[in-house]
Amino acid sequence: SISIQMTGIVQEYPAANGRGVLRVIDGIDLHLENPSINMLLGPSGCGKSTLMRMMGGVRPFNVKTPTQGRVEIDGKECLDQHDDAVTVFQQYANRPDLTVWDNVAFPFTLKLWKGRISPAEVKERVDTILAAVGLADKKAMRPAQLSGGQNQRVALARALVLRPRILLMDEPFGALDPQTREEMQRLLLALCKANPCLVVFVTHDVSEALALGDRVIVLSPQPAKIADDFMIHAEHP
Ligand code: ADP
Ligand code: ADP
């Protein structure tokens, strides 16, 4: 089991005009737990990414984050980036100079160096996840040879190969055409069934939130508070 507890979260950023501050999040309390897909839904600019980044302990260079409040993972305060969470972005950030296989193996580079994982295990894990995302026959290709959907599969594989307990997804399918997007949604649901983890998924698309979410958390426009928070499916025992 895993839990993310956010208490009294406030986030302020320097205002764009250089004077004063912009309060983007104004007192959010949120508790997420166990394998489930949790959608953060709200209009562009309302602070969804800001809230999600805090769960991974990712801090922007220019401000203290959160401005106020506390983020806990399994009851322990999260003050910095941690290994429990990995993030998938819309810009899939695949390395153009590496093959699909090497992109997915990339997160193990340091561990391999330090002898903390064997080459045989890396091979097993990379091959398994590439098969699961449907890219077994694209291993030797490079990102430029792949479609957008396929590149997003590579990014998803690179995240899941680490077997994270928390998967943070920041509008991952936002740039895809509607059909590819639906394929990716189906793939994500299948992957989550096979590899249960706590997913936090940011979107501004209502139908995506309803299609994927076990739970939908709606952020009201700025400064964001939670406007609605509801379960889509009955919880399975
Ligand atoms: P969303 O994910 O809902 O689109 P964001 O969390 O990315 O919203 O951004 C919310 C607001 O905060 C935006 O106005 C954005 O420009 C501003 N913002 C985000 N990060 C920073 C930052 N590091 N410094 C200053 N302003 C920021
Ligand atoms: P989509 O129709 O989903 O947008 P693409 O037309 O980009 O996809 O690609 C369709 C297929 O062709 C994919 O299997 C992709 O890997 C392959 N492909 C695309 N561009 C190249 C290329 N430059 N070299 C080799 N294979 C490619």
Image (spheres, rainbow, N blue to C red):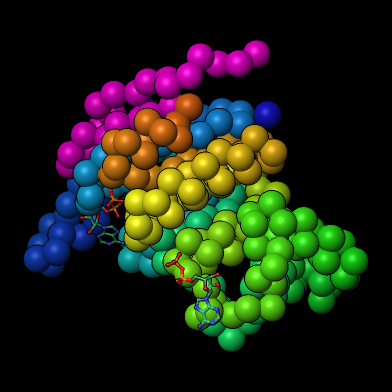
- Residue drawn at (30%, 31%) of the image: 218
- Residue drawn at (48%, 48%) of the image: 183
Residue 124, given in percent of the width and then of the height, sits at: 84, 60
Quarter of the figure that contains the N terminus: top right
Q: Residue 172 occupies which quadrant of the picture?
A: bottom left
Q: Nearer the viewer, residue 101 or 111?
A: 101
196 falls in the magenta region: no
Whether residue 108 is visible here, answered yes or no, is yes
- Reply above or below: 173 against 17: above
Whether residue 68 is visible here, answered yes or no, is no
Residue 95, given in percent of the width and then of the height, sits at: 56, 78
Quarter of the figure that contains the C terminus: top right
Single out the residue that lies furthest toward the bottom: 97
| 197 displayed left or right of 61 | right
Q: Which residues are magenta?
A: 215-237
- Residue drawn at (43%, 26%) of the image: 215
Residue 98, given in percent of the width and then of the height, sits at: 63, 81
- Residue drawn at (44%, 32%) of the image: 213
| 42 displayed left or right of 106 | left
Q: Nearer the viewer, residue 109 or 130?
A: 130
